[in-house]
Amino acid sequence: MNSNGSKVLQYALASLSTWLMPIAIVSLLFAIGLGWLVKSFLIVLGLLVLTPFILALGLQWWIGRNLVQDRCPVCEHPLAGLANTPLQCPSCGEALQVKNGGFERSTPPGTIDVDAVDVSVIPLKESQD
């Protein structure tokens, strides 16, 4: 008798039994009316697989809408910040606020922030009387 043939048959039955048992269990559940349990399990498994992808896409969308990249209005150092959040410039230490798609200096209440403008003096022509 060929002993190699029986080993091959045992191996084939062992690999078949790994698939045969879950199929038998699912068939039994459907037969006794518990198919909803299998369907629920498959739905939960699908949600567990899809949830990380949906979360990654949502995070990319949110960051794309709320991330602002601009320069510090004081020292022109490039910065990145989230919309409507305070931050401090790492270069000059100025307190900044993200507003209207750019950075603005944060000033305490009651402080008047003035931009200096250079006005050159133009001499007036003397009138001829």
Image (spheres, helix red, strand yellow):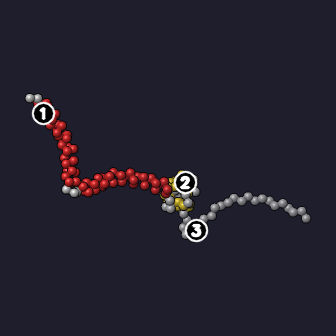
For marks 1 and 3, give the CA distance.
93 Å
The residue at 22%/57% (across/down) is 33
Please state which of the two labelled residues, at mark 2 or mark 1, is closer to the viewer.
1
Q: Position of residue 121 (x, y in %)?
A: 75, 59
> Which image quarter: residue 72?
bottom right
Q: CA distance from mark 2 to mark 3?
A: 24 Å
Label 2 residue SS: strand
The residues bearing labels 2 and 1 have C-alpha atoms spaced at a distance of 74 Å
Give the residue at the far bottom of this rendering: 110
Apparent side of residue 5 relative to residue 106 in the rendered image (left or right):
left
The residue singled out by tag 3 in the image is 111
| Mark sitting on residue 6 | 1
N-term mark: 2 or 1 = 1
Q: Residues within 10 Å of mark 3 (few under 14, many from 20)?
A: few
Q: Nearer the viewer, residue 92 or 95?
A: 95
Image coordinates for residue 46, horizontal then vertical, percent = 32, 52
Quadrant in the rendering for residue 29: bottom left
| Residue behind mark 2 | 70
* Residue found 21% across the figure and 44% down from its top: 19
Q: For marks 2 and 3, give the one nearer the viewer.
A: 2
Q: Earlier along the polypeptide chain: callout 1 or callout 3?
A: 1
**Mark 2 or mark 3, which has the lower sequence index?**
2
Q: Amino acid at mark 3?
A: Thr
The answer to which of 68 and 49 lies nearer the viewer is 49
- Answer left or right for 117 relative to 44: right
Residue 51 visible, this orientation: yes
Q: Secondary structure at mark 1?
A: helix
Taking the spot 50% from the left edge, 54% from the top edge, the residue there is: 80
The percent position of residue 31, horizontal first and vertical second, equals 20, 54
* Residue 129, x across and y down, in percent: 91, 65
